[in-house]
Amino acid sequence: MIPLSILDLAPIVEGATPGDALRNSLDLARHAERLGYTRYWVAEHHNMRGIASAATSVVIGHLAGGTSTIRVGAGGIMLPNHSPLVIAEQFGTLDALYPGRIDLGLGRAPGTDQMTVRALRRDYANAEDFPQDVLELQALLGPIEEGQRIVAVPGADSNVPLWILGSSLYGAQLAAMLGLPYAFASHFAPNDLLPALEVYRSTFKPSAQLRKPYAMAGAHVVAADTDATARRLFTSVQQQFTNMVRNRRGKMQPPIDDIETYWSPMEKAQASGMLRYAIVGRPEAIKRGLDEFVALTGVDEMMVVTAVYDHAARKRSYEILAEVGALRV
């Protein structure tokens, strides 16, 4: 089986606080390390009441400090929100503290709404500078050149591994051009998954970081001991995506008995479309779904999202996934 990794959106569930979410994230990261997962990523989102990972670099430090071997990183940092120098210093610091364990995935979207972008003191037109910003960041994390006047300290010569994240052909083209690993966000934007992977592999140019293409894709996975339990747990995700369709985001809701009472037929079609690659069920169904996804995509690694309201049930889901994925258990 290919390596399995975790994308944790640090969900704040109904009735809980951001502190609860972050403590759960550390507990889950330690659990994932014991189970043999490859990496544990958190993502930058702003002005969202249900996500506690806005200060992404701080959260990564919290997780890396509480674990010892698992790779920890950003999936991702939304680079248009930041100066490349600041990100080089932050991730250079993380690498200095936790050498060889830090990943830096980079996204082009703002991870929020336009009003919040302005509150971040950045102009979203900076997104057009994304390729140049990636190159600048890469240089700041690389060896110091003779005459270089701006140096990231820490950061210079750390060579923190960069990833390009995307949900369209744009990211695939950029990752291929720069010779970087590529992660596709098929856990919420599945439409261009296969074309993007084809573009990435067919146009890839080797680099100092990577000699051949390395692709990862995301999928929601909710596993339980029975199909009925897994389907019920998954209704929290279905409610969350229905609320995205309604443009009404909030904290994660507890599962419900009948999702059909929650969404309209149109909302069901839209939410289910975004969740096209979700894998839900008992262990046998999870194994079958993993095998089918890998056969379809040929990915080198999977990034799994398990958004479950109950923390113990979430941990159990990752245990089942580790078992069927033949990780260390």
Image (cartoon, grey):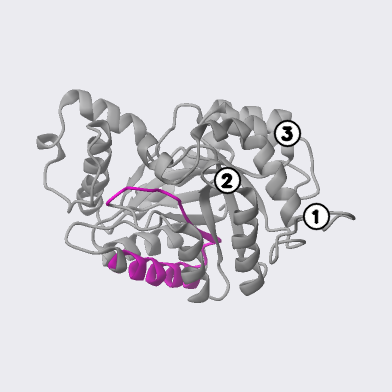
The residue wearing badge 3 is 177
Q: Find residue 136 and report its horizontal and vertical position in percent.
A: 71, 45
Q: Find residue 274 and report its horizontal and vertical position in percent.
A: 35, 33
Question: What kind of residue is marked 2?
Answer: Leu
Q: Can residue 329 be seen in this snapshot?
A: no
Picture residue at 60% right of the left edge, 57% below the top:
103
In this rendering, position of residue 306 left or right of residue 322 = left
In this rendering, position of residue 234 left or right of residue 30 = left
Residue 98 lies in magenta, yes or no?
no
Q: Can residue 168 be seen in this snapshot?
A: yes
- Circle 2 Cα neighbour tier, 10 Å, few/some/many (<14 / 14–19 / ≥20): many
Taking depth in this image into account, of 325 and 88 the one nearest to the observer is 88
The residue wearing badge 2 is 106
Question: What kind of residue is marked 3?
Answer: Met
Taking depth in this image into account, of 259 and 121 the one nearest to the observer is 121
Dot 2 falls on a residue whose secondary structure is strand
Dot 3 falls on a residue whose secondary structure is helix
Image height check: is 255 above or below 97? above
Image height check: is 268 above or below 35? above
Query: What is the distance, in whole Å, between disc 1 and disc 3 at their CAs?
Result: 27 Å
The residue wearing badge 1 is 149
- Circle 3 Cα neighbour tier, 10 Å, few/some/many (<14 / 14–19 / ≥20): some
Question: What kind of residue is marked 1?
Answer: Arg
Q: Residue furthest top?
A: 266
Q: Which of marks 1 and 3 is nearer the N terminus?
A: 1
Asked if the residue at tag 3 contacts the one at tag 1, i.e. Cβ–Cβ closer than 8 Å, the answer is no
